Image (cartoon, grey):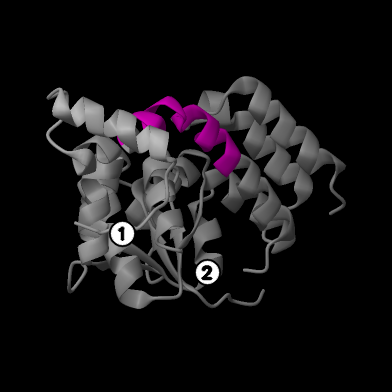
């Protein structure tokens, strides 16, 4: 399984939701995933075991400097501390992939030209990266409403499942 | 703060200036920021769904 290149920075959502589904190891496919300090603390509060199971591929890090642009966008998008730190780190590193399920953080990332994806994308990506079979991913998608705190409109989730079902493995 | 350069219809600007003159907002900058805030709030659900659709596309066909 090859490793991908952009610096990957995670907000709390995908870490928590993947752990809720029992597949946080999917993040290891990126090689290293940076977790901002505030996000780390948030995940520890909600899913204390999530970060314990992941060892060397999760890196706890605070931004060295704060981006003026991220600070300017913060009140506009009502960004929380963890999301702000994640975006500051993205600005610091340059070529980044931000993992977040938060709409405001994704909007801010978009306006900064930062690629961002969430839990559903990570699950489906696992098929393409051959980390999980299509059947395994479909089972995880079906489990989202009962097994996770990720809220997806039921009809939209059904659309997503249908899209994955019709896709050749 | 970030400075944005944008073009808006004259009539829209006049309406905005009228609101400022009437004291509804302190200045045009504040009005634009408030308008954006309200737009983002009212369209958040649609944007969330759009992002999920983008996730599916990335998951199935992305390069990274």
- Counting other residues with Cα less than 10 Å from the Cα at mark 1, is it few (<14), some (14-19), or many (20 or more)? many
- Tell me residue A95's x, y (percent): 45, 75
Q: Quadrant of residue B61?
A: bottom right
Q: Residue at x 12, y 34 (%)?
A: B26
In the image: residue B27, left or right of residue A89: left
Examine the rendered structure and indicate whether residue A153 appears above or below residue B28: above
Secondary structure of residue under mark 1: helix
Q: CA distance from mark 2 to mark 1?
A: 17 Å
Image quarter (top left, top right, bottom left or bottom right) of the C terminus of chain B: bottom right
State the residue at coordinates (35%, 76%).
A93
Question: Between A103 and A134, which is closer to the camera in this rendering?
Answer: A103
Residue B60 picture location, percent across and down: 73, 54
| Image position, residue B46 (x, y; %) | 54, 30
Q: Which residue, given by chain and number where applicable, does mark 1 sit on?
A: A86
Residue under numbered circle 2: A30
The label nearer to you, 2 versus 1, is 1
Residue A71 covered by magenta stretch: no
Image position of B60 (left or right of A95): right
Q: Residue at x 61, y 48 (%)?
A: B55
Task: Please identify the quadrant where the N terminus of chain B is shown.
Answer: bottom left
- A9 relative to A122, above or below: below
Q: Chain of mark 2?
A: A
Residue B48: say if magenta: yes
Have a look at marks 2 and 1 and say if they share a chain. yes
Please give the chain letter of the residue carrying mark 1: A
Left or right? Give the position of B64 relative to B48.
Answer: right
Label 2: how many Cα within 10 Å (few below 14, some 14–19, many 20+): some
Boundaries of the magenta span: B37-51
Examine the rendered structure and indicate whether residue B30 appears above or below residue A27.
Answer: above
Whichever of callouts 2 and 1 sits on the residue coming sooner in the sequence is 2
Marks 2/1 in contact by CB < 8 Å: the verdict is no
Residue at 59% across / 76% down in the picture? A3
């Amino acid at each position: 399984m090859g490793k991908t290149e952009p610096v990957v920075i995670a907000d709390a959502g995908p870490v928590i939701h993947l752990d809720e589904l029992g597949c946080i190891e999917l993040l290891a496919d990126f090689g290293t995933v940076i977790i901002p300090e505030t996000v780390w603390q948030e995940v520890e509060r909600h899913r204390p075991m999530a970060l314990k199971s992941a060892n060397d591929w999760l890196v706890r890090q605070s931004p060295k400097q704060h981006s003026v642009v991220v600070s300017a966008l913060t009140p506009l998008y009502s960004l929380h501390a963890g999301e702000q730190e994640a975006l500051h780190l993205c600005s610091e590193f340059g070529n980044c992939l931000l993992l977040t399920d938060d709409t405001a953080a994704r909007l801010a990332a978009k306006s900064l030209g930062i690629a961002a994806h969430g839990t559903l994308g990570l699950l489906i990506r696992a098929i393409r990266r051959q980390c999980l079979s299509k059947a395994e991913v479909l089972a995880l998608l079906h489990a989202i409403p009962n097994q996770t705190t990720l809220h997806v409109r039921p009809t939209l989730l059904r659309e997503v499942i249908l899209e994955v079902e019709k896709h050749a493995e | 703060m970030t400075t944005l350069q944008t073009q808006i219809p004259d009539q829209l600007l006049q309406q905005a200036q009228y609101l400022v003159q009437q004291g509804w907002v302190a200045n045009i900058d504040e009005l634009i920021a408030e308008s954006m805030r309200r737009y983002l709030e009212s369209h958040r659900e649609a944007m969330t769904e759009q992002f999920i659709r983008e996730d599916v596309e990335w998951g199935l066909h992305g390069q990274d």
